[in-house]
Image: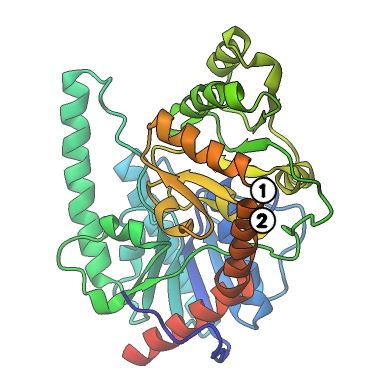
Amino acid sequence: MNHPGSESDRVRSASLSIFVAHPSSLLTDHRPHGDGLLAYRFITELASHGHHLYVAAERADLRSAPPANVDIHELGAVDARDPLARVRYMHRLRRLFDHLRGTARLELVHQLNPVHVGISLALVDSGLPVVLGPYVPDWPDRSSGLAAGAVVRRRASDLARGALAAIQQRRATALLLSSPAAAAKLHRGTPLASVYELPYGIDADVWIPKPEREPGHQILFVGRLHRHKGIFELLDAFEQITRRFPAARLTVVGAGPAQEELERRVHAGSARSSVRLLGSLERTATIEMVRDCDVFCLPSHAEPFGLGALEAMACAKPVVASRAGGLEHLVDDDGGCRVAPGDVPALAAALETLLAEPELRRRMGEHNRRRVQSRYTWSRVIDRLERIYAETMARR
């Protein structure tokens, strides 16, 4: 995997005219849509560096007007499950591209995450470099509860999609991975010289430490309430923790399909008076919750990247996470504890270790803050992306 340049050697590339082929299913600056929020941030950060972006979006919902050098064209939603709908979208995409090329000097195509299979193939004969990603790892396979016929159909569909994705990757000029965990998305025959690691960024001036806070025993979970987020294992581990740390508190921020079951489990459990379920919060309230906790815990069975953990790291918090997906690479041994997914005793032991040692928590938090500032700020990420663009343009 390529690592263009160093973080300290920051050379801004020349201004480019970039055609953004697909920035998630919803491009937004305020809706709770992770892919859409991150895609829009990539776009606006690139615009702030002087690049002109022509964005082909399914849908856009923006509270603020985009920068003057960002042109957004809505092409209509596409049902990702319908191959014919995707083909029709690709046709609209190509018509827009040809129209824009008649009026603008397009120089590069970038299809952002999620890299919907096939879409960039609408532009393979354009003669422009094509960048795909950042790719993220998949969530765990949840087909175990399906009927046999449904499993067969899903596997057949996966095989067809995989074959098309392999062609798409081989025809691309550069592939971006959010972390090494996303390498599983690469198909056989993909030239490794075209693969780069590019993580997501964070506002390190917004997610900041709260140094005046007195240490305590506050554990925080922020995320979608779904079984694959490990929320039930965390609850089981917390009930064990309260036997040693009766003053410990667990706060859960988020909503999702497991919310009702979680509420029942909390109310029936031994630690019900020590657990707060706050539901979804506005961003500013979430930031304050992260700044006020002692330990951030994200024990997902898998995690595409781990943005919640990154936000806690920026706030100088130690992180207890699972060795799964992007979390395994985002959280290191100097910044937290990583345990096997689903291992409740190991999760409880890791949390107890940190609750018992405030000085260890402080050192881990400070390490995490330094790591964020050196690698994960948006300015660092966009500097790296510009280097990737420059290398990609040079290869063509």
Which sits in the foreground, 338 or 305? 338
* Quadrant assignment, res 29: bottom right
Mark linked to residue 112: none
Q: Is residue 118 left or right of residue 276?
A: left
Residue at the spot 20% in from the left edge and 60% down from the top edge: 187
Farthest residue, direction top: 268
Is residue 28 shown to the viewer in this render? Answer: no
Q: Is residue 314 left or right of residue 8?
A: right
Quadrant occupied by the N terminus: bottom left
Quadrant occupied by the C terminus: bottom left
Name the spot of residue 160 as percent of width and height, x first: 18, 46
Q: Is residue 153 above or below residue 211?
A: above
Which sits in the foreground, 170 or 322? 322
Q: Residues within 10 Å of mark 1 (few under 14, many from 20)?
A: some
Please name the amino acid that badge 2 sits on.
Arg
Name the spot of residue 309 as percent of width and height, x first: 56, 50
Residue at numbered disc 2: 362
Q: Residues within 10 Å of mark 2 (few under 14, many from 20)?
A: some
Farthest residue, direction right: 212
- Labelled pair 1, 2 in contact (Cβ < 8 Å): yes
Q: Is residue 235 above or below residue 320?
A: above
Please name the amino acid that badge 1 sits on.
Pro
* Quadrant assignment, res 217: top right
Name the spot of residue 138 as percent of width and height, x first: 35, 46
Q: Helix, strand or loop at disc 1?
A: helix
Residue at the spot 65% in from the left edge and 83% down from the top edge: 50
Q: Helix, strand or loop at disc 2?
A: helix
Residue at numbered disc 1: 358
Q: Is residue 30 above or below residue 167?
A: above
Residue at the spot 19% in from the left edge and 30% down from the top edge: 153
